Amino acid sequence: MTRRTRKRIAILISGRGSNMAALIAAAIDPAFPAEIVGVVSNRADARGLEIAKTHNIPIKVISSRDYDGREAHDAAIHEAITGFKAEIVCLAGYMRLLTPDFVKKWKGRMINIHPALLPSFRGLDTHARALASGVRIHGCTVHFVTPEMDEGPIIAQAAVPVLTDDTEETLGERVLKIEHRLYPLALRLVVEGRVRMSDGVAVFSDVEDERRDLAIVSPGERRS
Ligand code: GAR
């Protein structure tokens, strides 16, 4: 695929932007089938904005405080990403629930990464909740976005062991590392049309190579 035919990706962030950085890093390779054409943050202080700037990627801050209600805020975001001529939207730590109208506009073309093996641990504090529940495997999920929070057809998941001496921080770091591997892989599948959303489910074709690359199995207990 030549550079000109690469799909145009907009990324929505709210904070640190490490998943955004992983997507930018993947797209630096001209063989990657997508390019990052713009980053939108709902927070002016999002650290990810500086990272995007260093890569000369256009950024836009669209704060909810400047809009009267969620619909108007999301309409401004829609305008910004259509202004970037984006074809696909990646949510990368975007911490606001999007309105059904916005989600509908990007149906099948918007994906999210969540720091848990969905459908377990939707919402916030996923690592603390995973530890408290005693699961021995934890991980992350990339899924198509539907109006309900952290729902939508699953595109790809990656797992890590939960170690007996894990804290929320150590477990979170281990998950974040695989988030950075999983998100570019999942985006590639979407961009290449090897996964698509149809009638509310993910439909796959030709994904055997990626499958071979994953699978991390617990119990991963540290020996004392
Ligand atoms: C990531 O762990 C991402 O999975 C999570 O926020 C973090 C953002 O970090 N997203 C959610 O919880 C969405 N439900 P980052 O800004 O460094 O990518």
Image (cartoon, rainbow, N blue to C red):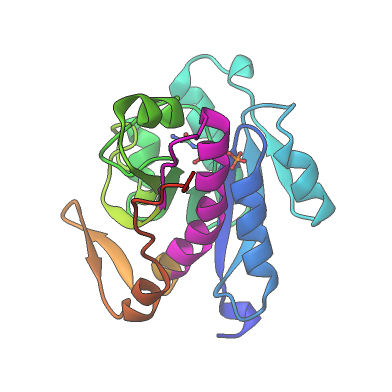
Please tell me in which quadrant of the rendered image residue 34 appears: bottom right
Image coordinates of residue 37 in percent, x first then y, are 65, 58
Direction right: furthest residue: 54
Q: Residue furthest left?
A: 199
Q: Position of residue 223 (x, y in %)?
A: 46, 48
Residue at x 38% of width, y 40% of height: 116
The residue at 55%/50% (across/down) is 82
Q: In the rendered structure, which segment of residues is drawn in magenta? A: 160-188
Vertical placement of residue 213 versus 222, above or below:
below
Q: Nearer the viewer, residue 210 or 173?
A: 173
Provide the major secondary structure of the magenta segment: helix
Please check the rendered image and state whether residue 68 is part of the magenta-colored stretch, yes or no: no
> What residue is at 58 percent from the left and 20 percent from the top?
64
Q: Is residue 181 magenta?
A: yes
Question: How far across and down, in percent of the image, does residue 13 sit?
Answer: 60, 38
Q: Residue at x 42, y 73 (%)?
A: 213
The foreground one among 35 and 139 is 139
